[in-house]
Amino acid sequence: MEGVVIVTSILLALATDAWWGRVQEGRLEQQYLAQLAADFREMDDGVTDWLELEESQLSSAISLLEFIDSDTPVPADSVGVWWLHAWSAPTVRLADGLLQEMIASGSLRLIGDESLRVPLSSFTRTVDETLEGLSQIEMGFTLMLGDPYFQKNLGMWGMYPDSVKVKRGLPSGDRFGIDFSKIRHDREFSHLAMRGYLYKRNRVFQVKNLQVAVHELQEALEQAAMLD
C-alpha cells in the first residue's frame, strides 16, 4: 500500500510539473504574441511609409520622362529633384529582432497556431529575398555611375558648391548646377532617365511585396494577441 502511495505521489508531482510547464509556456506565448504584434505594427507603418515614398519617387521618374518628351519650360530645380528621385534608394529599419531571436533559439515552437507559426518562420526569408532583390536592382545604379555621359553631364549629381558653379559659368543660385534644358532631348539622357524609371519601378515592386507580407502577419498577430 505504501508503494502505491509513493508511486501515486510521484505521478501526481509529474502531472503537476507538466501542467505548470504548460501554464508557463502559455503565458510566454501570450507575451511573445503581444510583442510580435507590436513589432509588426511598427514594421507595417514603416514599410507603408517606405512604399509611399518609393511610389512618390516613381511619379518623379515619370515626370522626368514627360519633361524629356515635351518642350514645356520647367524650373531646373524641379527637374533636378525628379532626376534624384528616380535614382534614390530609401530604406527602413525592420523591427524583426525578436522574431529572429525566437527562430534562432527555437522559441518559435511556443506559437501554438501552425497557420501563424509557419509564415512567421518564413518571414525572415521574405525579408532576405526582398533585400537581395533590391541589391540586384542597385547594380543598375552602379552601372549608371560608370556611364561616360553621366560622368560628363551629371556626375556628382550636380551638387557643386557655388565657387565651382561660377567657374563652370553657372548661376550660383542654381541648386543642381546642371542645365537640363540643354540635355533634355539628348538620346543618352533619355536612356538614363528610362533606366531610372525602370530602377524605381522595380524597387516599388519589391517593397510592395514586402508590405503585403508584413501587413498580413501584422493582422494575424493582432487577432491572435486579442484571442489570447
Image (cartoon, rainbow, N blue to C red):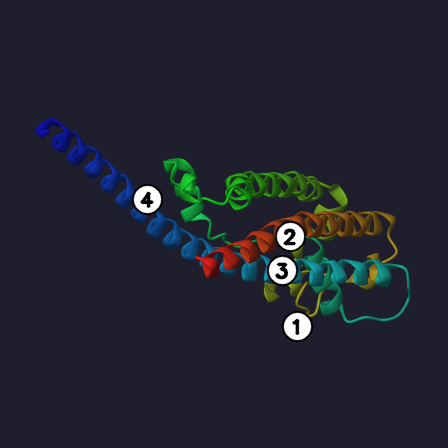
Q: Tell which tag, 3 or 2, sits nearer the viewer.
A: 2
Report the number of discs: 4
Whole-angstrom CA distance, mark 1 to mark 4, is: 70 Å
Element at badge 4?
helix
Residue behind mark 4: 22
Residue 160: tell me if it is visible. Answer: no
Question: Horizontally, is 6 left or right of 215 in the view?
Answer: left
Left or right: where 183 falls relative to 199: right
* Label 4 packing within 10 angstroms: few (<14), some (14-19), many (20+): few
The structure residue drawn at horizontal position 11% and vertical position 27%, both measured from the top left corner, is 3
Q: Residues within 10 Å of mark 2 (few under 14, many from 20)?
A: some
Q: Residues within 10 Å of mark 1 (few under 14, many from 20)?
A: few
Residue annotated with mark 1: 173
C-alpha separation, residue under disc 3 versus residue under disc 2 = 37 Å
Q: Are marks 3 and 1 in contact (CB under 8 Å)?
A: no
The residue at which mark 3 appears reads as 159
Q: Around disc 3, counting alpha carbons within 10 Å, would you say few (fewer than 14), some (14 to 19), or many (20 or more)? A: some
Numbered badge on residue 212:
2
Front residue of this view, candidates 186 and 144? 144
When the figure is inspected, residue 95 is found, relative to residue 175, above or below; the finding is above
Quadrant hosting residue 86: bottom right
Distance from disc 2 to disc 4, alpha carbons, whole Å, reads 34 Å
The spot of residue 199 in percent (x, y) is: 72, 48
Q: Nearer the viewer, mark 2 or mark 1?
A: 2
Quadrant containing the N terminus in the rendered view: top left
Q: Amino acid at mark 3?
A: Met
